[in-house]
Amino acid sequence: MINIKNFRKTFGSKLVHKDVSFYVREGECLGLVGGSGVGKSVILRSLIGLEKPDSGEIEIDGIQVHNLTEEEMVPLRQKVAYVFQGGALFDSMTVFENMAYPLREHFKLSDDEIQKKITDTLDELGLAGNEQNLPSQLSGGMQKRLGLARALMMNPKVILYDEPTAGLDPYNTKKIQDHILKLKKKGVTSILVTHDMPTALAVCDKMVYLLNGVVTSSVLTKDLYSNPNAEIMKFIEGDVA
Amino acid sequence: MSTYILGQWKKTYALFLFAGGIVNLSGQIIKETVRGKIYWKLLTEQIVIMGWKSLPLVIITALSTGMVMSLQYGLGLEKFGGKLYVPKLVAITILREMGPVFTALMIAARVGAGIASEIGSMTVTQQIDAIRALGTSPIKVIVIPRVLACLIALPLLVAVANLVGNAGGLYVGAAELKLDAHFYYQKVVTTVDFNDYLSGIFKTYFFALFITIPACYYGLSVKSGTKEVGQATTRAVVMSSILILVGDYFLSKLFWVLER
Ligand SMILES: Nc1ncnc2c1ncn2[C@@H]1O[C@H](COP(=O)(O)OP(=O)(O)O)[C@@H](O)[C@H]1O
Ligand SMILES: [Mg+2]
């Protein structure tokens, strides 16, 4: 479903990714872990074409992402949702307008249908009644849930979560975690970038550990503790950055 | 010395980058305006923000310009007994130059700065990325409504400025220069021709582009940090003002050639 091969990316003289390869099968959830600044967000951004790789191949659901133009990305971006770390909510629009935006752009729905879809999703994520608020009036946890809610409007086949639980209290963490699991049950393929190991252990099928621009280890979550020498364990235990 | 050269080189490089970026952005704007839908709601919203809300500023600017011009021409020409030419001179200067240029400069300061800082902040908070990630185009939803809105609002604002400026001229003419108000009015109406008016309005379409395109470009060029937003805003206003002032000369000359 998702396949990255020999991905390389530099910013100016700074080499962020030397040679990164991994794949995710349909319906799987991959945990992408690594210290801050190793380039996890850069990988997610490249998957939906917000960054261009210097070289290497990216394929999602049969689409060769790396050689698409900005316009050709549109069908891809309707299938693949990116849940931004900071929410990236439109701060001049209400919660309702934030959610309606992708719907109005890509679907021909009546106002009633839009209203219903938004109310249902807000309900599910515990945001009911906030339709007319501005994002700045919501708490941090609610903003993150709204970011997820907006991404869900397009019924994506693939979801890329960028630290969806970072900085959240246990209640909000649990809510997001539950929702990720629920989507996974529905067959959504996903990549989860996170430092939050309990969440990663709960939802990921396998994990890939990034260090110095390469994948240093890749393990199935269920084998993690029977394979204590893995680099990834050191990261989890806090022995390496 | 070498740091000086390096500094100059960097400035030249930045200028080329700007020129390239502007050409590229303009190309995208044209491409996406020609095909694809226009966002009427966003467009009207921007027209209100740029046009309607700028009205007080434009009126004050035009009124004081008209009044002070009438006064200075009056004082200057009085010595030669040329006070009777004040209405014509004030009217033509306003219609051809002061109305369009001063209005455009004020709009560059108010609207250009607003656009650059708004888009810059949207870039920093990843809202521009979000627009792209949701399969939509920032050019279409952010840039084009602003460019079109300014193309529509600026000529209207200048039309108002022209009227108000002349009214200011008339008031000073009557109150200070002791010209008969009716005479002043008649003089303006009979000596000004339609080309004077057109020459001014013709420029405003260019000025609208000089204001909005650099503002959008600098806003979109912000990478990270609020400091860059401030710089983008300053650069947008400086660049627009220079383009307006320098462009004005060439546009006046162009119209002058066309008129003959
Ligand atoms: N647009 C950019 N320009 C320059 N450097 C960038 C850019 N985006 C990311 N980087 C650099 O790439 C590295 C990886 O960033 P990021 O992917 O955000 O890390 P993280 O793993 O914490 O998500 C960082 O050192 C960052 O400075
Ligand atoms: Mg990150």
Image (tube, helix red, strand yellow):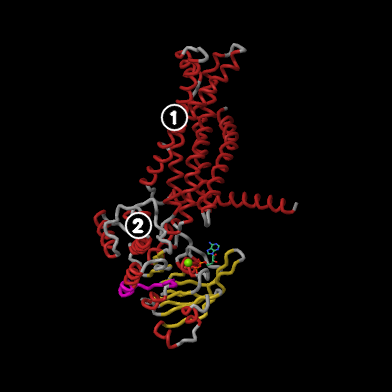
Residue B136 shows which numbered tag? none
Residue A138 shows which numbered tag? 2
User: Is residue B96 visible from the viewing direction of this image?
Assistant: yes
Q: Which residue is mark 1?
A: B160
Callout 2 amino acid? Leu
Q: Quadrant of residue B237?
A: top right
Number of numbered discs present? 2
A184 magenta-colored: yes
**In the displayed structure, would residue A12 be above or below residue B88?**
below
Q: Measured from the top left, where is residue A58 in percent x and y?
A: 48, 71
Looking at the image, which residue is at 72% across and 50% down?
A: B4
**Separation of residues labelled 2 and 1 (CA atoms):** 43 Å
Range covered by the magenta-colored residues? A181-195
Q: Which is nearer the eye, A233 or B187? A: A233
Callout 1 amino acid? Val
Q: Measured from the top left, where is residue B129 in percent x and y?
A: 45, 59
User: Is residue B195 visible from the viewing direction of this image?
Assistant: no
Q: Is mark 1 within 8 Å of ligand 1?
A: no
Q: Which is nearer the eye, B17 or B62? A: B62
On screen, residue B23 versus residue A124, left or right, reads right
- The C terminus of chain B: image quadrant: top right
Furthest-right residue in view?
A: B1
Q: Measured from the top left, where is residue A143 in percent x and y?
A: 37, 60
